[in-house]
Amino acid sequence: MNSNTSHPQIHTLNRRHFLKGAIAISTMALPLFGRDSLAASSIARPKEIPKDYPGPSERFLNAITSVYQQEPISDGKVTLNMPVLAENGNSVLLSVHVESPMNKQQYVKRLRLFAENNPLPEVAAFQLTPHSGTAQISTRIRLSASQIITAIATLNDGSHWAGSAFTTITLPACVEAFV
Amino acid sequence: MLNARISVPTSAIPGEVIEIKTLISHPMETGFRRGLDGEKMPRNILKHFQCTYLDNVVFEAEFFPAIAANPYLTFFIKATQSGELIFTWTDQNGKVTQKNRSISVQP
């Protein structure tokens, strides 16, 4: 009796799973052919993000597409150090390091920083040379919300490498009136 | 001419990688904030930074409004021989602030 009633249930569950899977596959495949570029869909993401995080803004995806076109951006080589929690979004210390021998044969040519949910996602762009000795930079940035910050390095061979971090902001930049 | 502070080691050995720290006083007004009258405050930022060493550009930075007020920037260069380092900041209207430091490189 029990087995008779449970059998069709399993059947419908399987079909539901199949449909879910099919939808997931189609939405995963969409960015490759849709308006999202290959570059934007393959960028490294930090492991721990809050569940209610809205995800990257359209502005960020457009910025990535306009800078890197369809070129692949690999995960690795770039270490982005940001505080996990920052009280004041007006000044958040950021330091970024790229693994590279920094000699004439192999060096980091460009390093770009993006804050994906800022009103203007571009934060800074650096040009390095073999004279830099080591590819490490630190600065202070503004964050308008808790979000993922991404650093993308372009090596002299043309390959792109990304590292990212999530920072929670207690007091966002941009909201306060001038005093 | 804006007030800028730069930290460069006064001496180094050839091939040594030295850290350079820079700090310049500038409001870096984003253009997204509203003043007390409710009007958006016009953007006023530094756009570009450059460091030359022995007449070669060794490091360049492009700033966007997301750089905090009083831009602080540290980076590294490889010391090869004694000479002058020139630091140049340019704001969005092309106004330039320039500082220099010399370094002595001895084995």
Image (cartoon, rainbow, N blue to C red):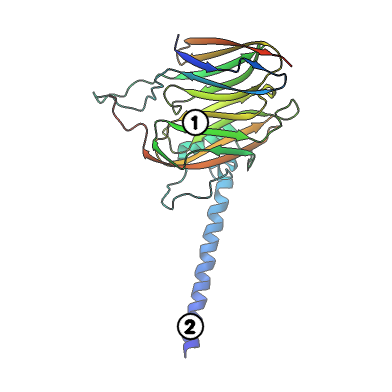
**Pointers 2 and 1 in contact (C-beta within 8 Å):** no
Q: What kind of residue is marked 2?
A: Ser
Residue A26 in picture, x, y percent from top left: 55, 55
Q: In which quarter of the image is residue B16?
A: top right
**In the image as oriented, which residue stretches furthest toward the top?**
B1
- The quarter of the image holding the N terminus of chain B is top left
- The quarter of the image holding the C terminus of chain B is top right
Q: Residue at x 52, y 18 (%)?
A: B48
Residue A6, numbered label? 2
Question: Toward the viewer: A96 or A173?
Answer: A96
Q: How crowded is mark 2: few (under 14 residues within 10 Å), some or many (20 or more)?
A: few
Sequence-first disc among 2 and 1: 2
Q: Residue at x 49, y 73 (%)?
A: A13
- Residue that carries the numbered disc 1 in the rendered image: A122
Element at badge 1?
A: strand
Of circles 2 and 1, the one toward us is 1
Residue B42 located left or right of residue A121: left
Question: Toward the viewer: A106 or A157?
Answer: A106
Q: Which residue is drawn at 56% across and 10% down?
A: B100
Residue A2 in picture, x, y percent from top left: 47, 88
Residue A17 in picture, x, y percent from top left: 52, 68
Residue B34 located left or right of residue A69: left
Question: Toward the viewer: A57 or B35?
Answer: B35
Q: Residues within 10 Å of mark 1 (few under 14, many from 20)?
A: many
Q: Residue at x 44, y 50 (%)?
A: A50
Q: In which quarter of the image is residue B78?
A: top right
**In the image as oriented, which residue stretches furthest toward the right?**
A105
- Return the chain for callout 2: A
Question: Toward the viewer: B61 or B79?
Answer: B79
**Distance between mark 2 and mark 1 Cα atoms:** 55 Å
Element at badge 2?
A: helix
Residue A84 in picture, x, y percent from top left: 46, 43
